[in-house]
Amino acid sequence: MSINNDTILPANFIRQIIANDLQTNKHNGKVATRFPPEPNGYLHIGHAKSICLNFGTAIENNGTCNLRFDDTNPEKESIEYMESIERDVQWLGFQWAGLHHASDYFEQLYQYAVQLIEKNLAYVDDLTAEQMRMMRGTLTEAGKESPNRHRPIADNLDLFARMRAGEFADGQYVLRAKIDMASPNINMRDPALYRIRRVHHHRTGDAWCIYPMYDYTHCISDAIEGITHSLCTLEFEDHRPLYDWVLDNIDIACHPQQIEFARLQLEYTIVSKRKLNQLVMEKHVNGWDDPRMPTIAGLRRAGFTPKAIRDFCERIGVTKQNSWIEMGVLEYCIREDLNENALRAMAVLQPLRVVITNYPDDQVENLEVSNHPQRHELGKRIVPFSKVILIEQDDFAEIPPPKYKRLIESGEVRLRGSYVIRCDEVIKDADGNIIELRCSYDTETLGKNPEGRKVKGVIHWVSEAHSQPAEIRLYSRLFTVPQPDNEDNFLDAINHDSLEVLSDCRVEASLAAASVENRYQFERTGYFCLDAVDSVAGKLVFNRTVTLRDGWVKD
Ligand code: ATP
Ligand code: MG
């Protein structure tokens, strides 16, 4: 495990509760958590918060954390989603103690429901969903009891068995808990426990035509697994009485403690699987792993590291107050990691040809350049220098703006890791577009400024003959407003300029061997990674993970 147990972790209310429970030996000194995703989409950065919290809590306390698929809604669930979830949890650096599925418990869940019926705590109802809604009451008004509420136990047992046996149509009957139609908490007004749904399940096939509801399933699954602390998001606070009611009324020894925390809401993006699914299905993005997506798969493809995401989750903390986190916090975390760990390289995004007229025609100098300015253990690479090089179009200006330190006509600039060149002549085509610069180099300037002459500007470059063609994809935020979720239609807030594809880029020779395992800082340009899907030998594709600085400062 890549998380260091010895670091002193900041207090939060969950750490506090667990420390107290350990002190009082509440759960026999055990800490057992779980991460319970529904396999109906890919995991997103909000899930990462829950993953780090659940697995992190277990690690900090020498406990265990399970991965449990909450797979009780077969219409929307799939094997593809399950596999992506397993991959993403492991990629984040976590390993589950047990891998479980709520569907593993279908038989037990059924038997517990029979128990509730036998105790006269559940009944079979034939009201339609609409009628049930009408009778549920409101926040200020009690609900009405169903005429079926007092059906005899024997009849309920018979009907429930026949529901399971497939004798009834979808929706014809439901099993409901018998709690209190006048409860101030609407969740306690005889909630549905089972519905009839003839849907093929990706794990249990057609074995079942009745499926248990989330609230009923979740608490029992937790108890079966011996979970001690069931951490969930705030919207379940009002469901806690039901969680406890179910466990109090069935014969099960374990009673986990549900603790709620605030969901992560991240600015300029969306963390709802339903809406992310819509972005994918309607092709507003190129799949779940589109680098603009806040999914773990998207962040990975964009070049985010597990370490940066874990660091982000620790930094935002765990509280009971819903709040919005600025995208800048996530960007800060990835910059911190990449500044320290990314290999340096040179890439020219919009090339301008520079011929060094006084450089020998066939000469090539293999310059040794550090892969990282501070971390010498990351080694050096060879960067070939030759007569024709490419620089960035906007590193030359005919009419320089004030304080411009890069190349101008009759001016000098240093090529990073190489010589100082001077621009002698600007070559244009018939339309007046600059097509080439003629420059001369100073042999005395390799790696140093000669006495009394200081050249301020430094620009990056590649040797034309040695460079590799590449496509570079510049991503920016997917939405134009900080809280797209709060728009009438979040699709109206999509940023249509969130992807800029530059297809004529040239990258330095060493990047022919670039690997998806590595991250790169293209000097002065940003942090990039190889695109794991579209990049092939001979056609490199790089994704921009993040700009070098907040707000794009150039030298
Ligand atoms: P979504 O609204 O995206 O579908 P969900 O809560 O329905 O989210 P689940 O698959 O049920 O998705 O989530 C698994 C776990 O992750 C749950 O415990 C849930 O509380 C937690 N989780 C989901 N979204 C967030 C979030 N934005 N911040 C923190 N935890 C989250
Ligand atoms: Mg859910």
Image (cartoon, grey):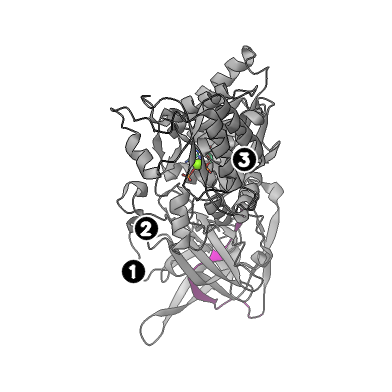
In the rendered structure, does residue 349 fall within the stretch colored magenta? yes
In the picture of the structure, the residue carrying the numbered disc 3 is 102
Q: Are marks 3 and 2 in contact (CB under 8 Å)?
A: no
Residue 441 visible somewhere in the drawing:
no
Gap between marks 3 and 1 measured at Cα = 68 Å
Identity of the residue drawn at 46% across and 47% down: 171
Quarter of the image with the N terminus is top right
Q: Earlier in the sequence, mark 3 or mark 2?
A: 3
Report crowding for label 1: few under 14, some 14 to 19, many 20 or more residues within 10 A (C-alpha).
Answer: few
Q: Which residue bears the numbered disc 1?
A: 399
Q: Residues within 10 Å of mark 3 (few under 14, many from 20)?
A: many
| Secondary structure at numbered mark 2 | loop
Q: Which residues are magenta?
A: 343-363
Residue 166 is covered by the magenta coloring: no
Residue highlighted by disc 2? 494
Foreground tag (3 vs 1): 3
Q: Position of residue 247 (x, y in %)?
A: 57, 25
